[in-house]
Amino acid sequence: MRIDGKCHCGNIAFTLDWPDAQPEIPARACGCSFCVKHGGVWTSNPNAGLSVIVRDPALVSPYAFGTQTATFHVCARCGAVPFVTSEIDNHRYAVVNVNALEGVDPSRLLRGSGDFDGEETSSRLARRARNWIADVRVGEIAV
Ligand SMILES: [Zn+2]
């Protein structure tokens, strides 16, 4: 099923192609220092597809910290963080912020939490390659 989402101002919009076989959407409140400050709650499915459209790339502020293996795509205009990417073996994986989803019945969100502080970088990347969205496209629209 198709789920739309965007940052607050709409500069970063996406379509999540979610597998029909999984009606529930995991929503993981991340315990990392960035997500605690932003209230980041993420979802992914290895069989999902993500298509991101950026209206003004100059208004996207990429942010990485710690192991520098994940990039938070922060909208520089409204401050929302709709998605995160990680490049693993020349493949781009992503997770999506459930707070940026639109039109999703909250009862479908399976709330949980995760704290991966202290995880070895190699196992961190292997976990992402297993669980994150593997079909990710990021494009710009001409304005
Ligand atoms: Zn925005």
Image: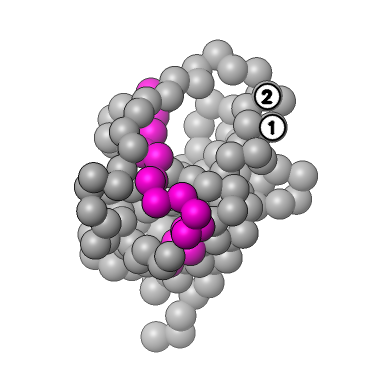
Q: Which mark is residue 126?
A: 1
82 in relation to 59, above or below: above
Q: Secondary structure at mark 1?
A: helix
Q: Position of residue 2 (x, y in %)?
A: 41, 67
Q: Residue furthest bottom?
A: 143
Amino acid type, residue under disc 2 in the picture: Ser
Characterize the local packing of mark 2: few (<14), some (14-19) or many (20 or more) Cα atoms within 10 angstroms. Answer: few
Q: Is residue 44 magenta?
A: no
Q: Position of residue 66 (x, y in %)?
A: 53, 26
Q: Quadrant of the C terminus?
A: bottom left
Q: Which residue is mark 2?
A: 123
Residue placed most toward the observer, 77 or 87? 87
Residue placed most toward the observer, 67 or 16? 16
Q: Position of residue 88 (x, y in %)?
A: 70, 43
Find out whether the residues at labels 2 and 1 contact each other: C-beta distance under 8 Å: yes
Res 107 seen here: yes
Tell me where the magenta segment starts and ends, as one range.
14-32
Q: Is 90 displayed left or right of 26 in the figure?
A: right
Q: Quadrant of residue 78?
A: bottom left
Q: Is 82 displayed left or right of 142 in the figure?
A: left
Q: Secondary structure at mark 2?
A: helix
